[in-house]
Image (spheres, coloured by chain):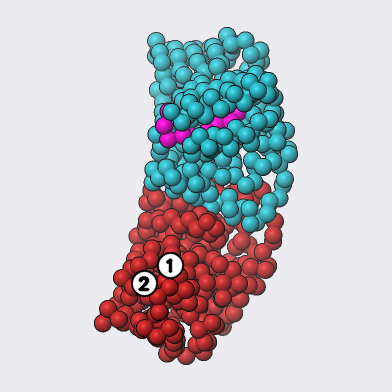
Chain colours: A cyan, B red
Amino acid sequence: MKKIKVAVPATVANLVCGFDILGMALNDPFDIMEIELTDEPIIRIKHTDGFNLPEVTEQNVAGVALQALIADYGKKIGFNVTVCKNIKPGSGLGSSAAGSAGAVVAANFLLDNYYSKPDLVRFAMNGEKLATGVKHADNVAPCIYGGITLVRSVFPLDIISLPSPSLFVTVVHPQIEVKTADARQILRKEVQLKNAIKQWGNIAGLVAGILKNDISLIGRSLEDVIIEPVRSILIPGFDEVKSKSKEAGTLGGGISGSGPSIFMLSENEIIAKEVEQIMINMYNAIGIEFKTYVTTINSQGVKIIDSE
Amino acid sequence: MKKIKVAVPATVANLVCGFDILGMALNDPFDIMEIELTDEPIIRIKHTDGFNLPEVTEQNVAGVALQALIADYGKKIGFNVTVCKNIKPGSGLGSSAAGSAGAVVAANFLLDNYYSKPDLVRFAMNGEKLATGVKHADNVAPCIYGGITLVRSVFPLDIISLPSPSLFVTVVHPQIEVKTADARQILRKEVQLKNAIKQWGNIAGLVAGILKNDISLIGRSLEDVIIEPVRSILIPGFDEVKSKSKEAGTLGGGISGSGPSIFMLSENEIIAKEVEQIMINMYNAIGIEFKTYVTTINSQGVKIIDSE
């Protein structure tokens, strides 16, 4: 196998209360990447998506992730990469993570799965470092593992794969710009102990709910008393979308990653679509361009769709 | 049934990283309580243990818990209670929780299990309020449910029962006084966000480890970066007991509740006993009176041992 085409999922980091530790892969939207293994020590990147992302290896998330992989691999290899992004950069849906994670997973297929998943997360985190300045794993881990992942620790890397409950996910991406670095900067460096205790009660509840497949417990635990009250200010319509979605019967939800996308988890497709309609009405009324998705949890991560 | 005798377990609150939310019941030590149902609206309490605890209903943890139960029950009933405590007050092993939880569970047996477990936790929390000034559930919940419990929220009360891994628990109670109120007061009201994130990563890891029965993950998650660094200062020998126990192969451990007892979790009895020897040597060397236990997790909670 010399050439491979993969579908690379969008991801929702944080999952409401699990700031910096939880993430979930979605079945929609996804990027398409084609990667060819060569014996020239060069990485060539081409974007066919019109997002005007840099194609210079050192400035491209896939480029730096593949550089890290090649440096570790040692032998003289290179890659030709063609990327067609559907996950819009800056959406809060793990667009940069998809770039770096998709590239190294596809490369690893071409190298006969030489590397383990934690290795691939390590390589892909170089892309996150380029995009946000910090080596985070909360988007690359679910992109590579699929389903819901818990990043217990980044140094040393400790990723725990959790089961995927059969829930529906409604996402709206209001097309305003929220820079990850800005969204991080507005957070207070200190939090009240009593709020931290509430938060870790909810995280423990959410993890227990996912592992016990206790949908009601998942719903009760989807509460963020630390990050959301600060970050949601950056997203017009957030509070109303959330409260109306709750009235419509959604389990709960919040900001996807650092925003501006909002996601809601629902037990069935009828509620998920009702939530979508609430989102559509809201952003039509506010007059902000937006895109919505009604999808499910992607339990597999990066998928091969073609190979030669 | 008019009279019942129960064994009421000691409990370890917090479980290292789960401050105020996690707790675990032990098979040893335990209190013995005898409760008789009467049709006089009086609660009579007698201690046979020599700890000089108050026997006046309003000043006794079992007394106030039973008062709350009777007030809710509505009918004209009373109880004669005889308590023989083995869980030393002030040990950090849930002595007050055992008093209130044991009383209401035993009373409920005599009332043909009229109340649910969450009801009993609500009544028993009145004892905690009397003992510590705050309605906490992290000791009474595992005492009533058995095994390991997660108190996601106290108001509204939300308790999640977790499975009991087959681990051995070594406990040392150095007989110094650490008042719960003091141990709470020395905590900072604010914590660094980066430490809170570490902590909730570990809590999520611990809960996942317990539910997946992944002993290595339980061990990796037994880390407390917020409470232990402050409270351990109150316990002479803590750091050395912990580091030597780790060298001996224990999974990990920390302060039981607000101390001064220290507990360690081990995969087998050989390590658990080695840890006990480390504790014995340490407190003999320091010259502090102490008591040790090598036991297992009590998965049942309060047990009936006799009834008439």
Q: Give the range drawn in magenta.
A: A261-269
Residue A155 vs A37, above or below: the answer is below
Residue B38 vs A140, above or below: the answer is below
Whole-percent x and y of residue A284?
63, 20
Chain label for disc 1: B
- Local packing at callout 2 (Cα closer than 10 Å; few below 14, some 14-19, many 20+) is some
The residue lying at 58 percent from left, 20 percent from top is A291
The residue lying at 64 percent from left, 40 percent from top is A228
Which quadrant does the C terminus of chain B fall into?
bottom left
The residue lying at 67 percent from left, 36 percent from top is A232
Residue type pointed to by label 2? Asn
Q: Mark 2 points at which residue?
A: B108
Residue B182 visible at all: yes
Whole-percent x and y of residue B7?
36, 76
Indicate yes or no whether the magenta region holds residue A250. no
In the drawing, does residue A169 fall left or right of residue B38?
Answer: right
Provide the secondary structure element on which disc 2 rests: helix
Residue type pointed to by label 1? Leu
Report, in whole angstroms, how far the alpha carbon at label 2 lies from the one at label 1: 8 Å
Q: Do the residues labelled 2 and 1 touch (CB within 8 Å)?
A: yes
Q: Mark 1 points at which residue?
A: B120
